[in-house]
Amino acid sequence: MNFTSFKSSALKSVGAVSLCVALGAGLVGCGGGEGGAGGAVAATVNGQQIMEQTITDYIADFRTNTSLETDEAWGEWMVTNGYTPESVRDEVIDYYINQNLYDQAAQEYGVAVEDADITAAMDETKAMFESEEAFQEALQASNMTEESYIEDVIRPNLLQTKLAEAVAEQEGGNAEGDDATLAQAQAMSEQFNGAKRSSHILLTGEEGEEDEALAARAQQLLDQINAGEITFEDAAAQYSTDTGSAANGGDVGWDALTTFVTEYQDALNGLEKDQIVAAPVKSEYGYHIIKVTDVFEVPEGGITSLDQVPAEFQEYLAYMQQSDDTQNFTAWFEEYRNNATIEINPMPEGLPYDIDLTPYEEQAAADAAAAEDAANADATAEPTTDDQAAADAAAADAAADEAAADQAAADEAGADAAADDAAGDQAAADQAADDAAADQTAADEAGADAAADDQAAGEGEAAQQ
């Protein structure tokens, strides 16, 4: 788990609440105040201070949200994930340095987030949920409020988006939106010219079916299509083993936007629009019956409007443009940061997250050595009759204990069901009854396991005698 990965990922998407839910408790609402820790300064960015208390609060929130409050849990987590208190502090400071630089750059480029922008972004986010209640539940599950979501996710995300646009316009003079997509289409017109869209029906061998029989079955289906006994689309839906394309009449898209196996592409090259292969095409995947459904030709005079370009090409070009913009902004920000004056102060003593990792490192090393020794022993040693009997007896005892525990849980759940029912809480009673039944089943299974292990233990002892 990375300290700043949650916020960094969240800042990339306005719909980040769903990401918060997926990741569970995250580092949201962290940051703390501008004081504390004796007023100590962790770092300065072009003269702007990042307080030590801000870093400490961030880490404290992380520990709380991930159940790492105790020194033992915290130490084990750091050792397991390759952290030290110093590297944790460095990473959080680095996060805040970037946030400060984004803010400073936004001021330089005259970028600001307006209330209308936030409202639109919130509406977009809420539209991802079935109801307002579902949205609030997602916020609560992510340890967020609507206000903290705006401040920690939406506002920074919008700021960076607007900053990237301002940088692109001022630094590079790049076209935006449809103009940029059109420029990309014109630049790639030669690559798109003659592109073919195709559908296929893939037939693969059934169990025990020889290749000759499969080829004959594919040819028979092709003959039926050519005779008009079944449409290509219906045949794809009924017989193609490529279930992903079968639902769409066998459509696999444009060859200019994807890569097909050599045999498929060679066959495609010899077909015109609405033409079907004369014979099934064999590849490593089976036999393909291929049909060209469309061909794109660049208009005379070149591409002058996006309306001339298939929608799939437009989507691809827009994605490419977005990717280029992201890379350009990343490179710009890296240079912007390199030119900044950044000072990071030494880590003070006595910080609450700064614990001695020695015992946890020693324990981790011991556990690793023990696991390696056990693996080596298991790989080279044959179990003796005595060892097997002892293992069976131990398993029997453990299963018996588990059975007793499950029986106790079943009894307790049954009592809860009765109490809930008596109180008139039928829903709770039903749930408790279900729990009781589940625990009873577990108890029965554990009891059966115990009996089986007892028998195994007895057999081991008998073999020993």
Image (spheres, helix red, strand yellow):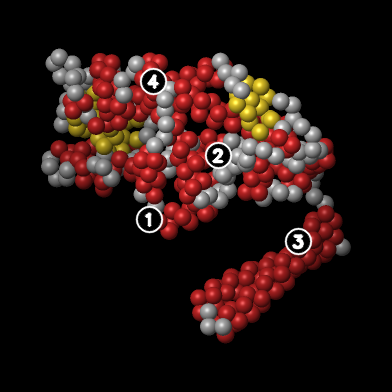
Could you tell me how far apart the alpha carbons at marks 3 and 4 are, in whole angstroms?
Answer: 67 Å
Q: Give the amino acid type for the residue marked by disc 1 in the picture.
A: Glu
The nearer-to-camera label among 3 and 1 is 1
Q: Name the element at disc 4.
A: helix
- Asked whether residue 216 appears in the rendered view, the answer is no
Q: Are there few (<14), some (14-19), or many (20+) residues within 10 Å of tag 4?
A: some
Residues under numbered marks 4 and 2 in contact, where contact means CB atoms less than 8 Å apart: no
Q: Give the amino acid type for the residue marked by disc 4 in the picture.
A: Ala
Could you tell me how far apart the alpha carbons at marks 4 and 2 are, in whole angstroms?
Answer: 26 Å
- Residue carrying label 2: 6
Residues under numbered marks 3 and 4 in contact, where contact means CB atoms less than 8 Å apart: no
Left or right of residue 344: residue 10: left
Q: Are there few (<14), some (14-19), or many (20+) residues within 10 Å of tag 2?
A: some
Which is nearer the N-term, disc 3 or disc 1?
Answer: 1
- Residue carrying label 1: 130
Q: Nearer the viewer, residue 367 or 162?
A: 162
Which is nearer the N-term, disc 3 or disc 4?
Answer: 4
Q: Give the amino acid type for the residue marked by disc 2 in the picture.
A: Phe
Q: Give the amino acid type for the residue marked by disc 3 in the picture.
A: Ala
The nearer-to-camera label among 3 and 4 is 4
Could you tell me how far apart the alpha carbons at marks 1 and 4 are, in whole angstroms?
Answer: 37 Å
- Asked whether residue 96 appears in the rendered view, the answer is yes
Task: Give the numbered dot on residue 113.
Answer: none
The nearer-to-camera label among 4 and 2 is 4
Q: Are there few (<14), some (14-19), or many (20+) residues within 10 Å of tag 3?
A: some
The nearer-to-camera label among 2 and 3 is 2
- Residue carrying label 4: 168
Q: Name the element at disc 1.
A: loop
- Residue carrying label 3: 395
